[in-house]
Image: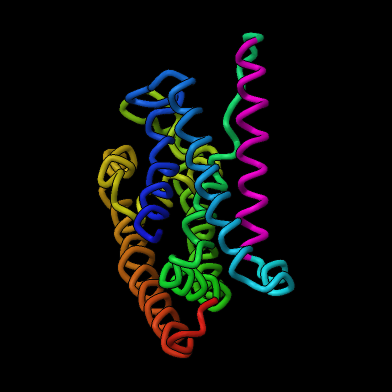
Amino acid sequence: MRTATYFFIFLNLSLALFEEPAVYPLPFLATSVLEVLCLLVFLGRLTHFAKVTLHNVFWKDTKNICIMVAILLSLSDLAIYGVLRLYGVRSIRWSRIVRPIFLINFAESRQIRRAFRSIRNTLPEITYVFLLFMFSLLMFSLMALKLFGERNLQTAEGLPYFRNYLEIVFDLYVLVTTANSPDVMMPAFDFSSWYALFFIAFVIVNTYIFMSLFLAVVYNNYKKHLKVMPGGACD
């Protein structure tokens, strides 16, 4: 039963690779039949839980309620999407976002729930570091707007350079990952090589200091919550 449950959970999650829009699209009828088959298996597994569990215990378990709601939402979305497709109305499958619920809430996924709860308990404690990082990002973006916004600089594509605050925030956010380095600083560097110091300071503060601090806080808090959880009390 555990192997079968894992197989159909994996199949249900994999349907997103073949449903429109997809790189390898399959006919709607094929993906629909597979999804209905998966949902029937999940419903059968839930029925099996109900048979071997006390009635009051079954209905007090939020995992069972989540699975039941996810099945109903998936079937409703599939039916609505099918009807709209028959009438040529374009729509989206919004119920895909509930599919990971099956992975988390079945009894076989005890370790996944444990990791998920550790992540959930860690989030409030890393909020302060994240807010401090965002404050640094916003301040550097404001400095960039003041430094470069009034110099009528242009990118290599001829677009305005660092004149819109929100675009600056996004560009510098990407620079934290160094994905757009050194392209993002070249218009300013061509104007004056001294402007490279601004980007060097930004990378040192936000990429090397804040990201290292953020990673350390996430790791330490996650490990702490993982240790304090009782070994078997994960449900």
Residue at 67%, 26% in the rendered image:
80
Percent x, y of residue 113: 48, 69
Taking the image as shown, residue 142 lies to the left or right of residue 76, namely left
Percent x, y of residue 84: 66, 17
Residue at 44%, 66% in the rendered image:
108
Displayed quadrant of residue 46? bottom right
State the residue in front, 214 or 210. 214
Residue 99, above or below 34: below
Magenta stretch holds residue 136: no
Magenta stretch holds residue 66: yes
Number of marks present in the image shown: 0
The stretch of residues the image draws in magenta is 63-86
Question: Which quarter shows the N terminus?
Answer: bottom left
Displayed quadrant of residue 198? bottom left
Question: Which quarter shows the C terminus?
Answer: bottom right
Taking the image as shown, residue 209 lies to the left or right of residue 120, namely left
Percent x, y of residue 95: 59, 39
Question: Farthest residue toward the front?
Answer: 51
Looking at the magenta stretch, what is its main secondary structure?
helix
Taking the image as shown, residue 40 lies to the left or right of residue 191, namely right
Q: How is the image coloured?
A: rainbow
Residue at 64%, 57% in the rendered image:
66
Residue 165, above or below 66: above
Percent x, y of residue 116: 48, 68
Residue at 55%, 51% in the rendered image:
44
State the residue in front, 89 or 49. 49
Residue 183, above or below 174: above
State the residue in front, 132 or 157. 132
